[in-house]
Each structure stands twice: as C-alpha cells, then as structure tokens.
Image (spheres, grey):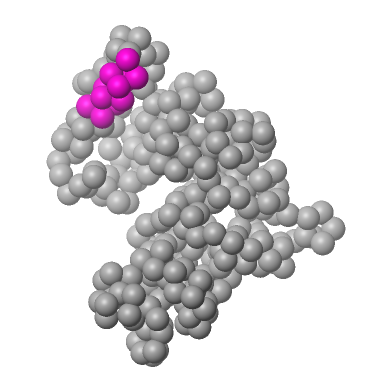
Amino acid sequence: MTNVGRDTEEIIADMYEVSVEAVVKAGLSMKQMSSWGIGMPSYVNPKTHLLVRANNFGWVNLPIIDYLKKYTDLDIYIDNDANCAALGETLAGVAKDYNDTLMLTIGTGLGGGIIMDKKIYSGSDKMGAELGHTKLVYDGIRCSCGQKGCAESYCSTTALVRQMREALEEDKKTLVWRLCDMDLSKIDGKMIFSAAYQNDILALKIINQFVDYLSYALSSFITIFRPEVVIIGGGLAESGDLLFDLLKTKTYENTFAAKEIGIPESVPAKLGNDAGIIGAALLQLHSDKR
C-alpha cells in the first residue's frame, strides 16, 4: 500500500526499495540495470522536470527527479501510469500483435493511454492524453482534479459505486442491499456486477447507465485516434460479457461512421498490475527520456 498520507521522502524511498527488491528477486543487481523506469499518476514536465499534478498524492509541481537522484545514478524515465500500462499491454500483453492501441484503466479514476507505432503518444509537450479528464458532461460533477464534468467522474469504478449508492436510496428491494449487508460503505464494482448477473433490475439499470457514459467517452476517443484495438484495464476488466457486450453495442451506436468503417474491438487487459511495471521497465526503449 502506498499510504499517500506519508511524507514524500518516505514514499519515494519505498519506491526505490521496491525496485531493488524486484531486481534482486530476478537474480540481478542494480549495477546491471541500464535505467530506472517509473509509472506515476501524473506527468513530469520535460522542461522543468517537475511532476505536474498527482491528485491522489496531493503532489503539485514536485521536483521528483531531484528526489529520485538521491538514490541512484541510473538514467530515470518517468511517464503516466496509464501510459505505462498501455505500453506494457501493447508490447507484451493482449495487444502485442497491434501497433496502434488505446487503453482505458477503470478504477478509482479513469486512466488512459495511447500507443502509436508501439510508442507512447502524449502530445507535443509530453503532458497530453489525460483521457479521464476530457469533458463529458457540461457543468457536471466536480472531479478530483477540480474541474467539472470530467469523464473520470462518470466512467470510473468510483463513479459506478456512487451511482449505485444514490439509486439505493429509492430502491429497498434490490439484491445489492443484501450483498452489502445494509452497509453502503461495502459496495464495490464487483458486487454491483454480481447482482446484475443474478438479474437484479436495479444493478442492470445502473450498469446500463454507466456503460452509456463510458461508451460516449470511448466513441469520442475512437473517432479521434482510430486505434486498432481498445484495451480495458482495471478491476472492471474482469466483469465479463455483460460489460463487454454492452460496451460493444453502445459504442457502435455512438461512434461516428461506425456503420461505414466499423469500430475497433474492446478487449480485457491481460497483464493486470504487471502491465504498468512492464511498461515502465521498457520506457527507455519506447519513449523520450524525462
């Protein structure tokens, strides 16, 4: 556990120690490493070398390179964690047979990564492709980033749980009440899908609404980037056919010229948490140095 309430120095020290442990477990030493790759829930400005904004950590314009250099002389490569996951799945996971992919990681937030020709695409200043913070609803729900109406506020697992909790106030017969033992704090995405697979009317309704939002966002990303395949990661990627069949249908309905040119297939991620680790380890070869 990261335990983000701790001192910054302590968190970064742990990052290094975990990296060393991984190297040792592989039967190697840090002296044999050519670089240190790190995935973070933010970007590092290539001009200032400052970590721009990691909402979950409360870090804004943090001189992260300075912190990291206290522990190693290795070249350091840092990119957004969702970008690293997308790179990992494209190079070694479910999308290894494709060159141009788009990945959405659905969890506490909504992460996004774009891969073009097997390399991370994040714009001219290397700080773009924040797909979760594109606008979905005008003057909508306040996001953790401070803006209103971000896709993350409607398409994350956090959003799904919020939508269910709001609906439960008016429905006392749904199976979800029994699954959570009448404790709203116990509700999670897996529980909602479990109820839906048991044909619970409210759970099916909430998931249908959730996938509406997700398909609206995804249809825009497809129209802009036209990837060969869309990768869905995060906990909800394990939700099975109910999610993916519904997402396919709704995304087809909402995407420009889908009847004429089709839409890319959406597939569940394969590597789990390892996707980001693999992607970060390969940053030296597949992205610009930070």
The quarter of the picture where the C terminus appears is: top left
The quarter of the picture where the N terminus appears is: top left
User: Left or right: 103 with respect to 107?
Assistant: right
Tell me what residue is drawn at x 70 percent, y 47 percent. 226
Q: Position of residue 275 (x, y in %)?
A: 46, 37
In the image shown, does 257 or 282 lie closer to the viewer? 282
> Is 21 within the magenta?
yes
Tell me what residue is drawn at x 51 percent, y 34 percent. 88
In the image shown, does 11 or 172 lie closer to the viewer? 172
Q: Position of residue 256 (x, y in %)?
A: 75, 61
User: Left or right: 92 with respect to 21?
Assistant: right
> Where 202 falls versus 136 (above or below)?
below
Tell me what residue is drawn at x 70 percent, y 50 percent. 264
In the image shown, does 148 or 25 lie closer to the viewer? 25
Report the residue that reaches farthest toward the front. 198
Q: Position of residue 239 (x, y in %)?
A: 50, 60
> Is 71 within the magenta?
no
The magenta stretch spans which residues? 17-27
Magenta stretch prevailing secondary structure: helix
Judge whether residue 290 can be spotted in this image: no
